[in-house]
Image (spheres, rainbow, N blue to C red):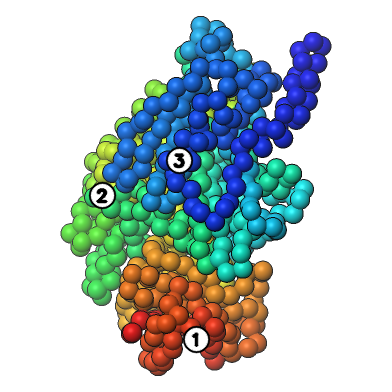
């Protein structure tokens, strides 16, 4: 009873103290971008309440951190120009240590941080809970409400990654957290908090949560400003002697410009140039891929009937018509027992048998990868190693390294077990090296939070999740270090593990499992994701302009069946050329040109602009959907210079027009004669 009363009193104290603590963590927009180093040294200084908080045995950190021992040191800077500061608070009584590893990016007015808790004592620590990795509010010298620009995660629907915007009036908030333990399932951990400002310019802060598990974020308007609170949803634990844990990470990027899109474009460049994995010292380029006649022949699914000879024949057929992609992509079903339909086996219920099917690939996969390399392409292979079917080879022989949960037919490979993690890394790394695998594709078709809950010990809520996600990062980092020219495709039932940390190591080249190739949904997905992340991909199985252009982006897989009678070599070649022409512009600035109140509707126009500031060139991609009644829509270009002159070429008709930048900004009429049509315009500055 005494313990329960103590917790109630502690919770009440936390509520009473939260307002004053948050007020000390307030940043005010004043029309001047903050210097990253100065911001870090101000908000993480000795004697101030830092922009994070937690409860220690129910007591708010704002009441005691100032009394703990404090140290600050510089970490190792990177070649990208960032700096690193390590701030540590130590409890002299219990030897609990809290470390904030903070990185600053002066060129982008950006900072990020992650917390680590370590028990340096000889006894269990006190209880650590309500960890708010970001606990900071924002105010503006201008009157008015903040607005939040954000997006859906994946629902496996047309509305996946649908952009949203909400005015945050006093007392209103937007709360989000992914169900099931995958970070972009239904919600999306990237936001733009737009501050009130003058009429002709905008200011705000882009932010992102980095955690490939169950994070939460609450963006709320209160008396002390509009706050962004985020962290791990399920963390309430003590630490054993010598134990260390990490939290989610959090990133802020400050911006100002003509409008709120200035923040998104600055963020896009930040993600590409600074955060994306590097290959040869440059940001990784996620490839244009071709499949191997996906699903052939009936009744096989995925690649359960794929053989060495068939795979090689498919690659050579692509080459015969000058259609060699950057990567040949082999998906699920290449492993043992996946095609045993007579035993009710298929690709999905045989994961964990990570041995090559010797009947179909008697020499392993090396002859397949060798053929791809000889044709000038890379070879990518699908795995789903975390989900382990219980009667699979791994499920039977490695059972001691598996986590179980009630009512499940699969285990979760325990990446939080160091011995298991070492095996996991070596097995897949050796497999890739032995078989000439260039690119690694990782899927994850299961909810996972129930496994973590089932295996947490009393008083240790969240430990299994932290250990698993930390192990996942260690595995990805291992692959990228061992294979410095490799890239990691991050799927998770299509785009359910997209967050700030996962994007540092991977990209979703199959961003949703929504109705394969359905163009209206694909247009919505492209439109919404490009506010935040340029490096994503999807598939396409048709060549008509409306469908094909719905899949334009930085990466794509062509699921064309080159053995079918309707195969049109010339249309395939046209699509190839168009994709490679437009793709570089997705790495530049992005401007939405049409409204996005309901982008799933069949009676709307959808259009966006890709602009290259360095040379004044760009593309406009536009769609008139099936039920859109008007053959024209007026749009206003972004990024173009008012006093410059631009030549616009219709890529389908060859028609050329000339306008000033001021005219394009004031309004330009897109025109598509027939419903379910598309328009691709290329423009360039001529003077």
When asked about the image quadrant of residue 394, the answer is top left
Of labels 1 and 2, earlier in sequence is 2
Query: Residue 453 appears at what percent x and percent y?
Result: 62, 29
Residue bearing the label numbered 3: 38
When asked about the image quadrant of residue 427, the answer is top left
Q: Is residue 418 above or below residue 619?
A: above
In the rendered view, does 639 fall on the left or right side of 198?
Answer: left
Query: Residue 285 appears at what percent x and percent y?
Result: 33, 57
Query: Label 3, label 2: how many angstroms apart (C-alpha)?
Result: 29 Å
Of labels 3 and 2, earlier in sequence is 3
Query: Residue 451 appears at what percent x and percent y?
Result: 59, 31
Residue 256 at least partly seen: yes
> At x 36% / y 39%, what residue is drawn?
83
Residue bearing the label numbered 1: 663
Name the one closer to the observer, 191 or 244.
Answer: 191
The C terminus is located in which quarter? bottom left
Of labels 1 and 3, earlier in sequence is 3
* SS assignment at label 1: helix
* SS assignment at label 2: loop
The N terminus is located in which quarter? top right
Residue 162 at least partly seen: no
The crowding category of the residue bearing disc 2, from other C-alpha atoms within 10 Å (few below 14, some 14 to 19, many at least 20), is few
Residue bearing the label numbered 2: 281
**Number of dots carrying numbers:** 3
């Amino acid at each position: 009873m005494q313990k329960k009363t103590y917790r109630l009193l502690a919770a009440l104290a936390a509520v009473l103290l939260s307002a004053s603590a948050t007020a000390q963590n307030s940043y005010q927009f004043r029309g001047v971008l903050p210097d990253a180093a100065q911001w870090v040294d101000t908000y993480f200084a000795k004697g101030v309440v830092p922009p994070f908080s937690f409860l220690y045995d129910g007591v708010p950190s704002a009441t005691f951190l100032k009394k703990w021992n404090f140290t600050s040191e510089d970490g190792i800077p990177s070649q990208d120009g960032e700096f690193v500061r390590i701030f540590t608070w130590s409890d002299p009584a219990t030897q609990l240590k809290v470390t904030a590893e903070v990185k600053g990016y002066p060129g982008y007015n950006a900072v990020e941080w992650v917390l680590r808790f370590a028990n340096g004592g000889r006894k269990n620590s006190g209880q650590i809970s309500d960890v708010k990795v970001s606990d900071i509010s924002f105010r503006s010298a201008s009157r008015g409400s903040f607005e939040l620009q954000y997006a859906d995660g994946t629902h496996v629907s047309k509305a996946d990654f649908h952009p949203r915007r909400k005015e945050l009036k006093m007392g209103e908030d937007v709360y989000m957290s992914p169900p099931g333990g995958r970070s972009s399932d239904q919600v999306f951990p990237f936001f733009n908090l737009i501050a009130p400002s003058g009429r002709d310019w905008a200011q705000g802060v882009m932010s992102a949560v980095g955690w490939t598990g169950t994070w939460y974020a609450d963006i709320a308007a209160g008396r002390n400003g509009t706050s962004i609170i985020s962290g791990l949803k399920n963390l309430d634990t003590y630490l054993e002697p010598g134990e260390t844990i990490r939290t989610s990470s959090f990133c802020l990027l400050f911006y100002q410009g003509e409008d709120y899109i200035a923040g998104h474009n600055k963020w896009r460049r930040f993600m590409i140039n600074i955060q994306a994995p590097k290959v040869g010292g440059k940001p990784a380029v996620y490839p244009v891929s071709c499949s191997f006649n996906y699903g052939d022949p009936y009744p096989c699914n995925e690649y359960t009937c794929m053989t060495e000879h068939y795979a090689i024949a498919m690659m050579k057929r692509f080459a015969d018509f000058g259609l060699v992609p950057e990567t040949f992509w082999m998906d699920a079903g290449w492993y043992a027992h996946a095609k045993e339909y007579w035993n009710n086996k298929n690709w999905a219920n045989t994961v964990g048998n990570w041995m090559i099917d010797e009947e179909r690939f008697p020499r392993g996969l090396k002859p397949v990868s060798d053929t791809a390399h000889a044709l000038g392409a890379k070879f990518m292979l699908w795995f789903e190693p975390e989900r382990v079917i219980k009667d699979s080879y791994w499920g039977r022989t490695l059972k001691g390294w598996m986590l179980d949960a009630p009512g499940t037919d699969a285990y979760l490979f325990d990446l939080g077990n160091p011995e298991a993690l070492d095996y996991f890394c070596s097995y897949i790394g050796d497999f890739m090296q032995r078989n000439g695998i260039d690119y690694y594709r990782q899927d994850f078709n299961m909810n996972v939070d129930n496994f973590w809950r089932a295996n947490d010990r009393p008083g240790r809520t969240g430990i299994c999740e932290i250990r698993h996600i930390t192990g996942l990062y260690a595995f990805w980092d291992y692959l990228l270090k061992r294979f410095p020219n490799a890239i990691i495709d991050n799927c998770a039932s299509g785009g359910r593990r997209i967050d700030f940390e996962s994007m540092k190591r991977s990209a979703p080249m199959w961003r949703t499992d929504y109705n394969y190739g359905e163009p209206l949904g694909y247009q919505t997905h492209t439109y919404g994701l490009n506010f935040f992340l340029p490096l994503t991909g999807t598939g396409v199985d048709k060549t008509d302009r409306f469908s094909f252009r719905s899949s334009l982006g930085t990466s794509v897989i062509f699921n064309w069946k080159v053995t079918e009678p309707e195969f049109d070599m010339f249309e395939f070649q046209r699509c190839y050329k168009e994709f490679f022409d437009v793709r570089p512009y997705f790495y530049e600035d992005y401007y939405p040109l049409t409204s996005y109140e309901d982008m799933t509707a069949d009676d709307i126009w959808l259009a966006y602009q890709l602009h290259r500031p360095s040379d004044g060139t760009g593309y406009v991609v536009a769609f008139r959907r099936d039920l859109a009644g008007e053959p024209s829509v007026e749009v206003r270009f972004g990024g173009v210079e008012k006093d410059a002159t631009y030549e616009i070429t219709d890529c389908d008709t060859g028609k050329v027009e000339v306008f000033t930048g001021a005219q394009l900004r004031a309004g330009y009429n897109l025109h598509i004669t027939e419903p379910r049509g598309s328009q691709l315009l290329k423009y360039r500055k001529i003077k």
